[in-house]
Amino acid sequence: MKLYVIGIGLIGGSMALELKKCYSTIEVFGVDTNEAHLDEALALGMIDHKGRLEEINQADRVILSIPVKDSLILLPQLLDRLSENALLWDVGSTKEELCKVVESHPKRDQYLAAHPIAGTEFSGPQAAHEGLFDGKPQILCEAQKTRPDLLIWAKTSFRQMGMYLRFMEADDHDKHMAYVSHLSHISSFMLGKTVLEQEEDEQNIFDLAGSGFESTVRLAKSSPDMWAPIFEQNKTNVLRILSSYIENLENFKRKLENDDIADLHQQMKHTNQLTTILNGIKHNN
Amino acid sequence: MKLYVIGIGLIGGSMALELKKCYSTIEVFGVDTNEAHLDEALALGMIDHKGRLEEINQADRVILSIPVKDSLILLPQLLDRLSENALLWDVGSTKEELCKVVESHPKRDQYLAAHPIAGTEFSGPQAAHEGLFDGKPQILCEAQKTRPDLLIWAKTSFRQMGMYLRFMEADDHDKHMAYVSHLSHISSFMLGKTVLEQEEDEQNIFDLAGSGFESTVRLAKSSPDMWAPIFEQNKTNVLRILSSYIENLENFKRKLENDDIADLHQQMKHTNQLTTILNGIKHNN
């Protein structure tokens, strides 16, 4: 079985490692515009060969793990050249536009829109590792549009990586990701920006970061190459939730200006229920 | 040596454990309005006896670790009754008002304004543990106002807990804490509130939280009893930095509305430099 991984970074690389573990006869070809990443992936045993997009007709399986903006262009072209029994899935963070762009493609049923909820703020093949997906959800969108035999193979493989499956429509996926992921990233990036603008002395950031900053700002280390296109593609949902967030911050500010500390206390108390919900993550799956 | 710990929670409890390790002859008295916490602390061997505020004149050392609003009232009263060679330090997150309230107190030099930058989002004696302060900074404010012999004892003891010392004026401390801690907490609480308002189905929060939310929202589990008074006491600084944060978010929103993705990319790229600064924390101290 020939697997082509297009974009050999954290997610693509880790998935290649997992599939190598599952299927002993698999042969992995890496495709990347970054030649250094390809060399690293070869050295790390993550891929067996460098591959080229032109050979994609030889692939049995294809993982598309590049910035979502590039996927929009590349996905239909790849499907055009895909052989009859091949399966291609992407791992991007937005799904609505991508599903739309191949809606009427004659090989739509050889594509699966997937989003593994796993990852760190680091990127590149050196960040990839086995076990990244263990216990994590894999969101599959419009799964009913994928050919049943290919879908079964994919579901089995993802489960073998330790993932549990969730099924969503593409528009629902993007809406919920705006709430639970994209807003978090904007919040974190802007928090980092605000503090950098104020703190002239980096030593203060060093010394005081442990008091909360380091945790809320972790996501501000994320790659702009990955995130700018996500915000762009999920613009409508992101703008809506960002407005709600700003409104809540404005309201907090007003209450503090008016010394309505009891109201602030009540808001925080209410939000504390997240503790229970997030603890539920561990027990529920 | 008799140590009184007023407020036997995460910080007070952990500090009691450390001092017991340092000084074999120490006897620890716990004072708390929460009787259950006192019983827990006794059971955990964190304190040797329950104590009462009325006996504070018997204390050699006093840790004041209660919400900052209560400290404002209690600190001068405790100093009034402190014996001649006793030292009292607080561990609160705001310092300017507290230092002001005892500015002209005849026993000002038996007080040390301290802020250990350590802690988690959890509270209560069961959250306390040895090693909490290891490698963490201890901020001392207006240290020159504390009697030299008492200050030396405190510095030695804090270093024995593994802490490194930083010295700041009280107003500087509060300004920097607004930037690097208080804003992070507001950002996190309001993020949690916003998502809770939108997500009707908690299962989505479960499944998607790993995509960023869980990390940015960790601080929203913090205790409102501790945090409402901090925001109140640091109102001026908090309002100023909160306004800058909202402005940055508004700007991000406008750029996204106008499809100026290049600008968003540039902002995120710039903020990425936090990676270097935060990595510096580990190497710098």
Image (tube, coloured by chain):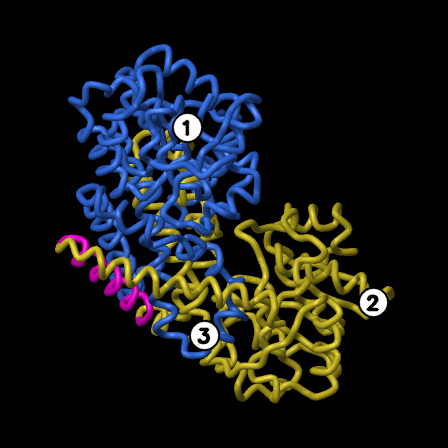
Chain colours: A blue, B yellow
For label 1, the residue is A138
Q: Position of residue A31 (x, y in %)?
A: 39, 39
Disc 2 with disc 3 on a shared chain? yes
How far across and how far down the image is residue A176, in percent? 29, 35
Assess disc 2: are there few (<14), some (14-19) or many (≥20) residues with their C-alpha within 10 Å of its C-alpha. few
Q: Is residue A244 above or below residue A175?
A: below
Q: Residue at x 23, y 61 (%)?
A: B263
Q: Amino acid at mark 2?
A: Tyr
Looking at this view, name the residue that lies furthest to the top: A149
Q: Is residue B155 above or below residue B252?
A: below
Q: Residue under label 3, please give it.
A: B174
Residue B170 is labelled as none
Vertical comparison of A260 with A156: above or below: below
Q: In the image, is residue B255 part of the stretch drawn in magenta?
A: yes
* Closer-to-camera residue (B214/B11): B214
Separation of disc 1 and disc 3 at Cα?
44 Å
Instruction: Give the label, 1 or 3, closer to the camera.
Output: 1
Q: Residue at x 38, y 53 (%)?
A: A223
Query: What range is drawn magenta here?
Result: B240-257
Q: CA distance from mark 1 to mark 2?
A: 53 Å
Asked if badge 1 and badge 3 are on a common chain, one would say: no
User: What secondary structure is found at the residue carrying circle 1?
Assistant: strand
Instruction: Identify the image quadrant of residue A236.
Output: top left
Mark 1 or 2: in front is 1
Disc 2 from disc 3: Cα separation: 32 Å
Which kind of residue does numbered mark 3 sit on? Asp
Numbered badge on residue B23: 2
